[in-house]
Amino acid sequence: MSAVLHIEPPEHALALRAAFDRLAAGFEAERDPSHAVRTDRLRRLEAMLEGMAPAMIDAIAADFGHRPAQVTRLADIVPVQLAARHARKHLAGWMKTRRMPTGLIHRPGHNRLMRQPLGVVGIVSPWNYPGMLALAPAIAALAAGNRVMIKPSEIGPRFSDLLREQVGLSFSADEMVVVTGDAELGRAFVSLPFHHLLFTGSTAVGRQVAMAAAANLTPVTLELGGKSPAILGAGCDLPTSVQRLLFGKLLNAGQTCIAPDYVAVPRAQLDAFIAAMRAAHARQYPTVATNPDYTSIATERHYRRLLALLDEARAAGARVLGLHDEGPSDATRKLPLHLVLGAPDGLRVMREEIFGPILPVLAYERIDDVIAHVNRHDRPLALYWFGSDATEREHVLRQTLAGGVTVNDTLMHISQEDLPFGGVGASGMGAYHGEWGFRTFSKETGVYHQSAFSGVKLLYPPFGATFDRLLAFMQRLG
């Protein structure tokens, strides 16, 4: 039972298509897998993850340069385990055909809703959380009865190779495969005629993926990013809020699609906020360059990009505050958190997703000014509000639109299997997690059952007075 597949140009297009065709043939041979079959696949994925966890921790750490084992367990292993268990627990209910309401004019017939597998699902996963963002959607796709093909990021080659090997040992080539290769292979991958394609990555690449999928009329789920705001609002507990904000910003050194990308602070609290952030940084990360709990920036290119953002902000007259005595470490590619205050809107740090330990700070007088700022820009993947004023909270939530929200904390909405996770507008489309993932990778088919006692024959031609009376009756009844 081997699905090991490593593909390099120029044969990549043919080899990819052959792998896709094997998966499609497997689906055609078993279009509606039983509950037992789906559960077995989920259990095999869980067992695979359990067995590969130590090697996975080492591979991801090597890909990053340094990444704490605790971060990988917290973000890439445990969430996948919990998602698989949640899916197994609820799978029977998700699969069940539902009796649906039926309008009076269509009785005594009745309606049902069937959830059917789509076929072959493609998953393109990024490098920042390579385990969770490859395997969590795979869980949803397998639970829904599909076959799965994964293309992990070439930026994390050690983990990608490990995942390819382990999936090949745990699944047959007509169930689930992992293909590895460069950006050229990625372009060929998203051009395959998948029955659904899920992409996690940047907004710019997401647009290209959507255009490639459109050629095959392949539906897409795009999990992108953007500038997710954190708002310190009325009644905010500053010490607690700052600790939670800092954790969400510096987990994985800010290389998180839902990390707070900027923070709005009441102007009267600005100095207290800066002091509290400095103290929180010292508490959570007393050192940086040699701290085993602090993640490196994954590549030299991304590290240099972050330094360039700071240089540009300084040159434009913004106030740049390093929150730690240590500066950037070229040797370890570790960068302490920097606050950027008074940055003009046109700067890259205010326009682009930062994806690192830099946090612009917007001082505000009125909460409606913050709402207006959020709404002037692309809709974010996440929004965070801190405070105790329920009226202001609901005002902010109802007057803005984000992919997901956590109140009085950061990041936590992504780990809720009982809530959908997904972006909106430039931050994505579609959703998954829990039952929403099952539904994303299913066709919800409406089925109407006509009764033997139906009076529909009264609508048949030749038309006359009976037809007119019946149609008028249907209009009144409906």
Image (cartoon, rainbow, N blue to C red):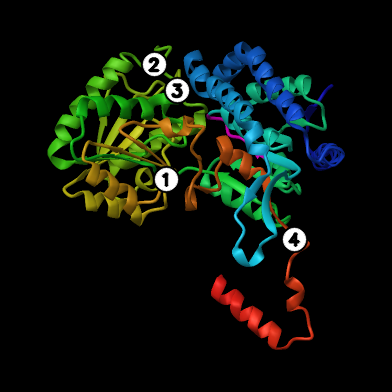
Q: Amino acid at mark 2?
A: Ala
Q: Residue at x 48, y 30 (%)?
A: 415
Q: Earlier in the sequence, mark 1 or mark 3?
A: 3
Q: Amino acid at mark 1?
A: Glu
Tag in front: 1 or 4: 4
Which residue lies under the disc numbered 4? 450
Which residue lies under the disc numbered 1? 352
Tag in front: 1 or 3: 1
Q: Earlier in the sequence, mark 1 or mark 4?
A: 1
Q: CA distance from mark 2 to mark 1?
A: 26 Å
Tag in front: 4 or 3: 4
Q: Earlier in the sequence, mark 4 or mark 3?
A: 3
Q: Which residues are magenta?
A: 123-128
Q: Earlier in the sequence, mark 2 or mark 3?
A: 2
Q: Amino acid at mark 4?
A: Gln
Which residue lies under the disc numbered 3? 333
Which residue lies under the disc numbered 2? 289
Q: CA distance from mark 4 to mark 3?
A: 67 Å
Above or below, comparing residue 18 to residue 217 in the picture: above
Q: Residue at x 37, y 28 (%)?
A: 248
Q: Earlier in the sequence, mark 2 or mark 1?
A: 2
Answer whether residue 124 is magenta in the image. Answer: yes
Q: Amino acid at mark 3?
A: Arg
Judge by depth and name the residue closer to the eye, 370 or 412.
Answer: 412
Assign a secondary structure to mark 3: loop
Answer whether residue 61 is magenta in the image. Answer: no
Q: CA distance from mark 2 to mark 3?
A: 8 Å
Q: Residue at x 86, y 40 (%)?
A: 25
Q: Residue furthest bottom?
A: 464
Q: Position of residue 328 (x, y in %)?
A: 37, 23
Tell me whether the residue at label 1 lies in contact with that at label 4, contact meaning CB atoms closer than 8 angstroms. Answer: no
